[in-house]
Image (cartoon, coloured by chain):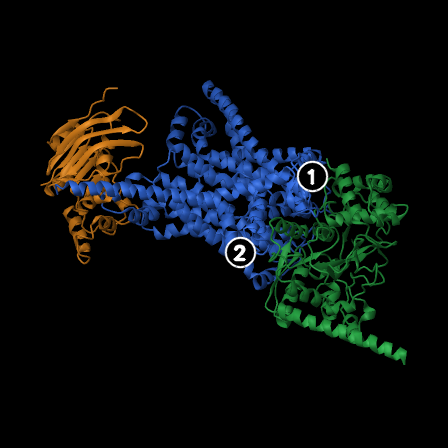
Amino acid sequence: MDDPIKQSVEKALYAMNLKAAISLHSALIAILTAAFFLPIVLGFWQTLLPSFGYLPVLGVSKFEFQAWQDLVTEPGFASSLSLTLFTGFASTVLASLLTFSICAMIQNRIGKFATEKLLATFLATPHAAVAIGLAFLFAPSGFFSRLITSWTTEWQQPPDIITINDDRGISLIITLIAKEVPFLLFVTLSALNHIPTQKFMAVGHALGYGRAQIWISIIIPQIYPLIRLSLFIVLAFSLSVIDMAIIVGPSNPPTLSVLSLQWFYDPDPLSLKLATAAAILQTLIIVGAVIIWHAMERIVTLAGRWWIRKGQRDNISDYLMRLLAALAVILLACSTLALISLIIWSVAWRWPFPDVTPLSWSLQSWTYVLNSKLNILFNSVVIAACTSLISLFFAIAWLEWPKFESPSIRIIVFGVIILPLFIPQIAFLFGLHILFLSSGFSASLISVCWAHSLFVFPYIILTLSDSWRSLDKRYIRSAASLGASRLKILARVKLPMLLRPLLISAAIGFSVSMGLYLPSLVIGEGRIPTVTTEAVALATGADRRLQSVYALLQALFPMIIFFAALLIPRIVYAERAYLRGVRL
Amino acid sequence: MFRLGLALTAGFLMLTTSVLASEKWTQTLAKAKGQAVYWNAWGGDQRTNVFIDWIGEQVEQRYGIRLNHVKLSDTAEAVTRVVAEKTAGKSSNGSIDLIWINGPNFLSLKEKGLLAGPFAQDLPNARYVDFSLSSPSSVDFTIPVEGFESPWRLAKFVFNYNSARLASPPRTIREFLTWSKNNPGRFTHPVVSNFLGATFLKQALIELVSDPKILQRAATDDNFDQVTAPLWTWYDELRPTLWRQGKTFPASEQAQQQLLADNEIDISMSFDPASAAAAIIDGALPDTIRTYTLANGTLGNISFVAIPFNARNKEGAMVIANFLLEPETQARAQNINILGSFSVLDQSKLNDTQRALFGSLPNSTALPTNAELGITLLEPHPSWMTQLSKAWKKRYTQ
Amino acid sequence: MKKLELSHVTIRLRNSAHPLIDDLSLVALSGEVTLIMGPSGIGKSTLLDFIGGHLDPAFLARGSVKIGELDITYMEPERRRVGIMFQDDLLFPHLSVGENLLFGLRSDLNKATDRQALIEDALSRADLAGFANRDPASLSGGQRARVTLLRTLLAKPHALLLDEPFAKLDKHLRTDVRSFVFEHAIAEKLPILMVTHDETDAAAAGGKVFILHETSR
C-alpha cells in the first residue's frame, strides 16, 4: 500500500470530484437563474418601459413621466393608496398578533394531530374560496343576518348597512386575516420546535410570570427571527392581493392592485401606461413596507426591552392575549362556517332571504361541472401535481448540493429564489407574457406549469429547507461512516426520515398552484382554464351555487393531498414512535 | 327584348357571383375542417356558456371544427391579448380566433387595424340579416361595422323588478328619482367602470338632455359639461337615496342580480331582455320578477363576433360566425329554456318554415313580448361613454 | 494489525489565521483505546470530523490521516472505512433495529442469504436476541448504545472513532456499555480513538492519552 502514485491518484480524484461538484453546482445555479431570475427581471423591465412612455406598438416611444402624473392625479388615487397601505399593514399586524395569541393559548394544551388536521383544512382552502364563503356569511342578506331575522322576525328586507365591500376595507382586512392566520400558525408552530418551549414556560412560571408574559418576553423574541420572512411574505401578499380584493374589497375606489388590473384590461390600450405605472408603484410600496416594518420591529423591540427590564408581573397581557386568541378562534370558526355554507349553496336550488335553509335542493350544479368540465379539473390537478413534483425535485437538488459559495452569495441566491413572492405578480407577468410571445411560444400546460413553479418553488424551498437543515447531521455522518454513498444516504436515510416534511411541502406547493389566478390567466392566455380562473370569472357572475362548486373543488384537492401528507407518514411509520413524534 | 336580355344578364351575373361565392365558401369549409378554434367570450353567464358548449358540439359534428370557449371575465382581456401579441410581433398564429365583442372594444381593435376582414357579408347566412345603412347590424355604437364583425345576439337595456313587492315600477328616468326618494336604499346600478353601469348613465343622459341628436357625434371638451349638466343635477339628488347611500355599488350585472335575489334591492337592470326569465328557470331569481322597459324607449345594440388580424384559424372562425346566424341556431338561442337571447335575424327575410321555428318557442311570464320591448334608442358615440365614466369617477370617487 | 496515524494535522477556520489544532501528530495502535482529552471547544470533535471526512467547509485542514499505509486524507467519507459513535445513539428512527444493522452490514463482504443470520447472531451476542423487528425508540439507552456499536462494527471499519459515546448514560450503565464497546472493538483489533471528558473513561481505556491544550493566540 505504500504507493505514492496511488496516493496522488487519490488526491487527483478528490480534486476532480470537487471540481465536478462545483461545476454541477454552478450549472444548477445557472438553471435556476435562467428559469426563475431572468424571466422575472425581463418581465419587470417590460413593465417598467411603458410606465415611462415607451410603447412602440402604439406609436409612442418618448421618455416621459406622463403616466406617473396621470396616476397621481387619477380621481381616488390617494384613497386607493391609503386603502392599500391600511389593509396591507392592518391585516398583517393583526394576523400576527392573533397567531401569537392562539399559539400561546394552545401550546401544550391541544393535541398536535388535531391542530394539524384543522390547520390543513384552512391551509388547503384557496383565498378566493374563503372570500366567497365569508362574503355570504356577513352580507346584509347573508347567513348571520338571516339567523337574526329568524329569531326576531322583524326584518322584511335585509338591513341597508354596509358589511362586506365597505369603503374602509375592514371586510377585506378580516378576510385576509382569516386566510393568513392559518399560514402564520403553521409557520410559527414549526418554529416552536426549535426551542424548548416547555422549559422556558417552567422557568418563567417559577419566576412568577403568567403565560402571556412569558410568551411576549421570552418565546416570541426567540421565534420571531424564524418567522420573519413569512411575515414579510404575508405583508407583500396583502399589499398586492387581487382576487380577495375583487370579491370583498371596496369598489369605489378599489385597492391599487385591482385598479392596475382594471387598467391592464381597459379597452383603450393607452391605459397600459397607467396600468404599468400602478404595477411599478406597487413594487415600490412593497419595498417601502418592508422597510417600515423593519423600523416598527425596532420600536417594538425597544418598548419590549423596557417592559422586560421593569420586571413587572401583570395579568393584563394575559387577558389581552386570551381575548385575541378568542377572536382568532371565532374567525377560524367563521371560515369553517363559510366552507359549510359553500357546501350548502352548491346543492341548493333556491335559497332566498330570509330563509336560513334552502327552499329547494338540486345536484345540478355538481352534475354540470363534473359532466362537462372535467377537463378543467384535469388541467388544475395535472398542473398542480407536475409543478409541485418538479419544484420538489429542484428543491431537493438545491438543498442537497454541497455549498461552495460564500454566505453572502448564498443569501443573494436565496433572495432570487423567493423574489417572485415579493414582486407583485402583475408587475412582471404581463411583461413576461410579451416576452413569451416574442420568443414564439404559445400557451400550453408546460408553460403554465413553468409559470406556476415560479411561485411554488419558493414556497417549497421555504417550507422544506428548515426541516432539511434541522436533520441531525450526525445521522448522515454515521451513514457515511458505515460506507453509504451520498445517493444512498439521500435515498435511504434523508428522504425517509424527512418523508413528512417532504409530503407537507408538496401539499403546500399543490395548494399554492391550485390557487394561482393571474399566472394561469396571463401565461395560459385563457386557453388553459383552471378551477381558479373559472372560479374568479364566475365570482363576477351571479350564480352563487356554481361559484360554490368551483370554490369547493378549489379546496377539495389540496385538502385531499394535505390529509394524505399527514396520514401517509403515520401509516408508513405506524411502528416508529420517534418519527410519529417528530415535528416538522 | 332588351329588357329581358338585361334581366337575364343581371340574373346570370347574380348567378355567377353566387356560384363563385358558394365555391369560395366550399373552400372555406374545407380549410376549416379539423381546425381548433379558440373563441374568447365573456364567461360570466352560465346559460351562455352552456349554449356555447352546444355550438361546439354542433360545429364538431357538422364541420369537424373543435371549438374551445376561452372564458373571459371582461372582453377587454382579449383586446389586451391581441395588443400584446401585436407588441410582440406575433402577426400570425395568434392565440385568439374569434371574439365576442362590440362597442368600445370593437372600436379599439378596428382603429388599430387589429381585425381580420371584412368578412361578415361573405357569410352565406348574411342574407338573413338586415345590413342596410344605419341598421343595428351595420352600426355598432355609431361605429360603421364595415364587415369587420358579424352579429349574433341582440342586447336591449331592460329593468327587472319584483312584482311581489312593487305594483308599478318607475317608467321614466325622472320617476326613478321620486321612487328612490320614497324607497331609500332599494335601488342601485352597477359600478360605472362596468359596462352596464355606464349604460344606465347613458340611458339617463338621453332622456335628460335637451337634444339627443348631439350624442350621435363625438363628445368634445367644449360641449361635454354643458350637455351633461342636467344629468349630474339629477344624479346628485339620486345618489344619496341609493342602496348603501350610493357609497358602494355592485361590481356587475350579475352581482346586482344577486342583490335582487337576496331581496337587498327591488329593481335591477340588464342588457339581456331574457336574463331574468332565464334566472327564474334556473332558480336564481324568485318567480315574481318581471322585466320591463321605459316609456320613452331604452338603449339597444347587437353583440358581434370578430376575428383578430393574426388568428390562426380564420376559416374555422368564419364557419362558426356563419353557424351562429343559422335560423335554427338563432331560434334555439331565443328559446327561453335554453338561452332566451333575442334574434338578430330580419324576420321578413326568412321563409315560412324558418319563421315557424320562432313562432313555436315556449313562453315565460317574466319574458317581455317584442311589443313590450318598446322603442330601441340609438347608442351614443363611444366617446360619451368614456367621458361619462371619467366624469363620474372624478365626481364621486372619494 | 493496522494503526491509525495522524501526521502534522493543522485545522483552522477559513476566515481565521489562528489554528484550532496546531501540528498534531499521533498514532492509535490497533486493539488499543487512545484517548484525546481537553477542555470544551478545543477542537476534539472537529479533529474527529477531519478523520472521518466530515469536516465542515468552514474549516481548512492540513496534514494527513493514514490507516496502516493507506492515506485516507482526501477520500470520500464513505470509502474511508472509519466507524464513528456519537454521544447520541443516532439509530435511524425510520428503520427497525434489524434494518439499522442491515444498513450497516456491508453487502460486498457478506452473501445476501446469510445477512439475516449474521444480524440475529450479532444481536444475540449483545443479549438482544429477538430485537430485530423492534422500533429503536422502544429500546433502553444501554440497548440502543449496544445496537449502535453493532451497526458500526458490521460495516467492518478499519478504525473506530468514539465521540464521548457514554456521556449521556447513567453511571451504572456507563460502565456496562463501556466495557461492551471496548471488549468488542478490541476483539476486532481496531485502532480506537476516543474523545472524552470523563476521567473514568481514561482509567478504563488504559491506553495512551493525548491532552489538547489551548493553542497560543
Q: Which chain is green?
A: B
Q: In which quarter of the image is residue B17?
A: bottom right
Q: Mark 2 points at which residue?
A: A444
B212 relative position to A413: left or right: right
Q: In which quarter of the image is the C terminus of chain B?
A: top right
Q: At which x and y percent is residue B390?
A: 76, 41
Q: The orange chain is which one?
A: C
Discs 2/1, front: 2
Element carrying mark 1: loop
Of residues B59 and A4, the one nearer the viewer is: A4
Q: Which mark is residue A253?
A: 1
B380 relative position to A55: left or right: right
- The residue lying at 83 percent from left, 70 percent from top is B348
Amino acid type of the residue that numbered disc 2 sits on in the rendered structure: Ser
Q: In which quarter of the image is residue C140?
A: top left
**Would you say residue B147 is visible in this rendering?**
yes
